[in-house]
């Protein structure tokens, strides 16, 4: 049993994934070799059982840590402004808000009136214009509000991930 923060657990996961990648690459590059008929083969060092067991052990540790993080995220609460939310809810809401922020960013950059260059042809030389159909100031304000909500959530998560500990059975 080991006690750790989410930040530490994620760093540990990254290290385990890097180690696993090393063994997977070692297996790919060493499980076969090429030799000419007229030469002494250079056989790479490779033990299938050892590599397979190491990858399986790493996968087991990764699964245990990810499960512990998921349980922790589903049950632990964090204060974001006046709302108390579980970590997984915060992560879901942040993803939703980031998508909304991207839409609002595009909308806030639109000109109130813009000429459509491709809309007219030689037969109809009358230009067409694209107009926004919303209150640009309202969209700009909404963009700022969404950005602030995301920042508040991220700050609450950062503090939580660095300070709150949970137990992992590894």
Image (cartoon, rainbow, N blue to C red):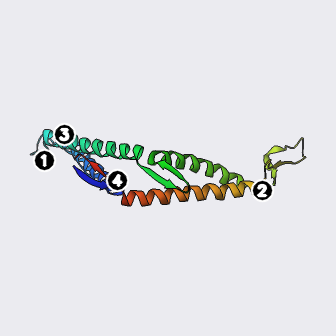
Where residue 10 appears, as percent x and y from the top left, is: 34, 53
Residue lying at 36% horizontally and 43% vertically, measured from the top left: 71
Residue lying at 71% horizontally and 52% vertically, measured from the top left: 107
Query: Which mark, by number, is residue 45?
Result: 1
Q: Earlier in the sequence, mark 3 or mark 4?
A: 4
Quadrant of res 121: top right
SS class, disc 2: loop
Where residue 108 appears, as percent x and y from the top left, is: 71, 55
Q: Which residue is mark 3?
A: 52
Marks 1/3: CA distance?
Answer: 14 Å
Q: Which residue is mark 4?
A: 10
Mark 3: few/some/many CA within 10 Å (<14, 14-19, 20+): some
Residue 33 visible? The answer is no
SS class, disc 4: helix
Discs 4, 1 touching: Cβ within 8 Å: no
Discs 3, 2 touching: Cβ within 8 Å: no
Where residue 170 appears, as percent x and y from the top left, is: 22, 47
């Amino acid at each position: 049993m080991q006690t750790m923060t989410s930040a530490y657990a994620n760093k540990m996961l990254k290290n385990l994934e890097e180690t696993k990648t090393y063994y997977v690459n070692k297996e790919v590059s060493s499980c076969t070799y090429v030799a000419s008929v007229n030469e002494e083969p250079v056989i790479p060092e490779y033990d299938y059982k050892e590599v397979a067991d190491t990858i399986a052990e790493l996968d087991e540790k990764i699964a245990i840590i990810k499960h512990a993080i998921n349980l922790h995220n589903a049950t632990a609460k964090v204060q974001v402004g006046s709302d108390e939310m579980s970590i997984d809810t915060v992560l879901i809401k942040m993803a939703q808000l980031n998508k909304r922020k991207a839409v609002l960013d595009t909308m806030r950059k639109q000109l109130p009136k813009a000429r459509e260059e491709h809309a007219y042809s030689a037969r109809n030389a009358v230009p067409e214009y694209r107009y926004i159909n919303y209150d640009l100031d309202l969209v700009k304000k909404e963009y700022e509000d969404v950005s602030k909500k995301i920042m508040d959530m991220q700050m609450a998560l950062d503090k939580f991930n660095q300070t709150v500990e949970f137990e992992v059975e590894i």
